[in-house]
Each structure stands twice: as structure tokens, then as C-alpha cells.
Image (cartoon, rainbow, N blue to C red):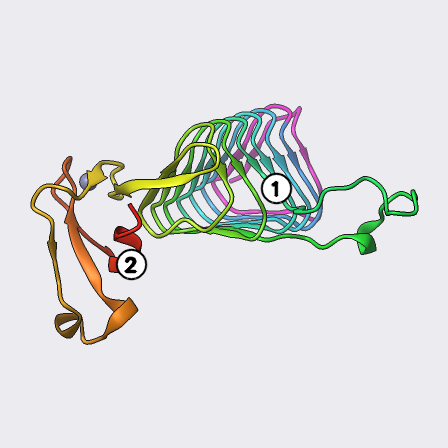
Amino acid sequence: MVMIHETAEVHPTAQIGPGTRIWHQAQVREEARLGRECIISKGVYIDYGVVIGDRVKIQNGAMIYHGVTIEDGVFIGPQACLTNDKLPRAINPDGTLKRDADWEVGRIRVCYGASIGAGAIVLPDVTIGRFALVGAGTLVTQDVPDHGLVIGVPARLVGYVCPCGGRLGAEGQRSRGAREQGSGGAGERVVLWCQRCGTEVEVRRADWERV
Ligand SMILES: [Zn+2]
């Protein structure tokens, strides 16, 4: 069963998965596709053609624009904004109003289990990796690796996080050589541990060394 609050506006061509709840004054536009068991909170805007997976939570007032794809299990904090225009202009150089054909849609992918903090802004042509965590108020201008923790304006990578949200790394960290992983160079992985729940997580060595 789908729950749509009477004040929400869901376009008839939008597809909504079973168990999804859409709250007060949310707007879901044409051809948007939402999976099952999602929570779309008050005042959320979901643009036309946006694709959202299962068990996604989108908090009050978040803006999700055309060109965005959100995988399963993603959290989007209140008033986060996922944008789609890298060269925003209302008008063409000749002063005429820009039409759909006059600009190029940027793409954003938010991968499985990732979280985006309150008030964060994500610029177009960015992928946010699996279980990555974007801090509140962060401005994301480039890709975030799997499990990466980014904060600040512009975002900088400051660490790694577990699926539980705890910090990974530092103590007890050890590295696994390329041979052990059966691949060389960029394929080399570092094994980290969660300081909260003890889970072991592998990240790319090249990413780990960016911190
Ligand atoms: Zn953990």
C-alpha cells in the first residue's frame, strides 16, 4: 500500500512502490520512479524522471532535480539540494530565455546506503559512493569514494565510515598487498575496521591515501 498525504502532489505518471509514504506538501513530478518503503517527508521536491530506489529516506524540504539517480537505502537530510545545471543561466547570450534545448542536464548518482547531511549541496556530474557520508552543509563538487566521509565548502575527504555510520581506520589498520588481492596498482586495497561495531571494510588504497 502507498500512503500519499492529501496535501502532497504526485503526478499520475509517477510510479510509487508499495509501502512508500509521501507526506505533507511533497511534490513528485512526471515519470519519477520511487521504489518500495521510501519515506518522502514534508515539502520534498522530486523532479520529473528522477529515479529513486527502495528504503530511501528524504527529509523535509530536500530538492532532487532531474538527472539524479538515488540507489537503495540512501538518506537525504533536510533541505539538501541535488542540482543539475553546471552552467546556470536564465538567458542565452542573445538575451532570449533559455529553453530545454539550450542547456545540458548534469547527472548525479547517489549509491547504495550513502547519506547526505542537512543542507548539503551536490553539484552535477558527481557520484557519491556506497555508504559514503556527506556532512551537513557540505558543498560536493567531485566524486566521493565508497565509504568516504566528506565535509566542508568545498567538500574535502576527511575519513571513511562504516555502514553503521562509525568511523573506520586509524587504529589497527593494516594493508593488504596487491598480490593478495590478485590485482596490481590501483586495485590495491586497504582493510579498515569500524571503531564502533568492529566491521572490517576494504577501501581502495589510492582513495585512502587522499585522506
Ligand atoms: Zn560499524
The answer to whether 167 appears left or right of 20 in the picture is left
Q: State ligand 1's quadrant.
A: top left
Q: Position of residue 52 (x, y in %)?
A: 52, 48
Location of residue 70 in the rendering, given as x and y in whole percent from the top left corner? 50, 48
Tag 2's secondary structure? Answer: helix
Q: State the CA–CA distance, disc 2 to disc 1.
A: 28 Å
Magenta stretch encompasses residue 14: yes
Task: Identify the residue at image location x=22%, y=37%.
Answer: 167
| Left or right: 154 in relation to 27 | left
Relative to 174, is 186 above or below? Answer: below
Between 72 and 84, the one nearer to me in the picture: 84
Residue named by callout 1: 83
Whether 183 is drawn above or below 11: the answer is: below
In the image, residue 164 above or below residue 25: below
Is the CB of the residue bearing disc 2 within 8 angstroms of ligand 1?
no
Closer to the observer: label 2 or label 1?
2
Tell me the quarter of the image containing the C terminus: top left
Inspect the magenta stretch and tell me whether residue 86 lies in it. Answer: no
List the residue tagged with mark 2.
206
Task: Return the residue found at the far left.
Answer: 172
Range of the magenta residues? 1-25
Give the main secondary structure, helix, strand or loop, of the magenta stretch: loop
Is the residue marked by circle 2 packed among few (<14), some (14-19), or many (20+) residues within 10 Å?
some
Q: Residues within 10 Å of mark 1 (few under 14, many from 20)?
A: many
Q: Amino acid at mark 2?
A: Ala
Q: Position of residue 8 (x, y in %)?
A: 65, 29
Residue visible at 13% across and 67% down?
A: 177
| Left or right placement of residue 117 versus residue 83 in this view | left
Using the image as rendered, state which of residue 202 and residue 88 is in the foreground: 88
Where, by quadrant of the figure, is residue 6 drawn?
A: top right
